[in-house]
Image (spheres, helix red, strand yellow):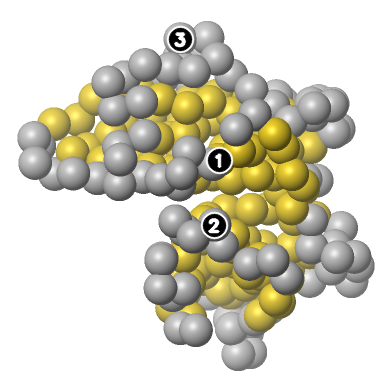
């Protein structure tokens, strides 16, 4: 049964991850042993999950198994901060990282794919910013990138990069993709309102 992962804010204003399992109907607070503050960001049908832990200036990726065993935190080589977005059934992890010290990936980053200990960079061609936010079992990756003009677009990477925008949107971000290639995400319309979208192949 697939766990649902998210964050909650405690009385001390620290965000702590929680995990729901539909069959057992329980909630478990999940914080990486190295830091009580953290966030679970993705899970697979095999019940493995990934997340990010740290503070406002530095974050690191981690994995947690369905038995509750945490990995050591990890970052791509040379990264100052990273965040893991999703782990797919093959065990590959997709996320993003930055080389800039004293900042998190929310300001400047590139995507990464970690598989069997090897990292590959996911960087939309010519982009000033690339965030890999979702992936499916076949290994297709989706996310958001910012072009040289400062406009953000959704993207799909499946061996080649495809850019797309919700019609009339000023901002588009892809956050997930299923095995059939259906993409979900969010966009900002001309009135500045945030809405969700579904994009079919």
Q: Is residue 73 above or below residue 164?
A: above
User: Which one is in front, 150 or 163?
Assistant: 163
The residue indicated by pointer 1 is 93
Closer mark to the observer between disc 2 and disc 3 = 2
Distance Cα–Cα, label 2 vs label 1: 10 Å
Q: Identify which residue is drawn at 65% across, 44% down.
A: 113
Helix, strand or loop under label 2? loop
Q: For this view, does 73 lie left or right of residue 162?
A: left
Q: Residue furthest top?
A: 34
Q: Tell whether label 3 touches label 1 (CB within 8 Å).
A: no
Q: For this view, does 185 lie left or right of residue 144?
A: left
Helix, strand or loop under label 1? strand
Q: Dot 3, how many residues are within 10 Å of its Cα: few (below 14), some (14-19), or many (20+)?
A: few
* Label 2 vs 1, first from the N-terminus: 1
Q: Is residue 56 visible?
A: no
Q: Dot 2, how many residues are within 10 Å of its Cα: few (below 14), some (14-19), or many (20+)?
A: many
The residue indicated by pointer 2 is 139
Please tell me the numbered disc located at residue 33. 3
Closer mark to the observer between disc 2 and disc 1 = 2
Q: For this view, does 113 lie left or right of residue 11?
A: right
The image shows residue 189 at horizontal and vertical percentages of: 58, 81
The image shows residue 46 at horizontal and vertical percentages of: 30, 40
Q: Is residue 78 visible?
A: yes
* Label 1 vs 3, first from the N-terminus: 3
Q: Tell whether label 3 touches label 2 (CB within 8 Å).
A: no
Is the N terminus in the top left, top right, bottom left or bottom right quadrant? top left
* Location of residue 170 by image quarter: bottom right
């Amino acid at each position: 049964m697939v766990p649902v992962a998210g964050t909650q804010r405690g009385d001390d204003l620290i965000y702590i991850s929680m995990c729901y399992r539909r069959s057992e109907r329980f909630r478990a607070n999940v914080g990486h042993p190295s830091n009580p503050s953290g966030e679970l960001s993705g899970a697979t049908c095999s019940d493995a999950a990934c997340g990010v832990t740290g503070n406002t200036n530095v974050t690191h990726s981690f994995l947690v198994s369905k038995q509750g065993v945490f990995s050591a935190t990890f970052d791509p080589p040379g990264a100052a901060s990273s965040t893991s977005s999703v782990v797919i059934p093959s065990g590959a992890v997709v996320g993003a990282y930055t080389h800039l010290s004293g900042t998190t990936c929310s300001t400047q980053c590139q995507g990464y794919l970690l598989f069997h200990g090897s990292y590959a960079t996911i960087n939309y061609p010519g982009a000033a910013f690339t965030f890999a936010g979702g992936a499916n079992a076949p290994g297709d990756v989706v996310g958001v990138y910012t072009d040289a003009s400062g406009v953000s677009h959704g993207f799909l990477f499946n061996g080649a990069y495809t850019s797309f925008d919700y019609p009339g949107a000023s901002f588009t971000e892809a956050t997930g993709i299923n095995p059939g290639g259906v993409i979900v995400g969010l966009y900002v319309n001309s009135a500045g309102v945030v809405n969700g979208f579904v994009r079919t192949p």
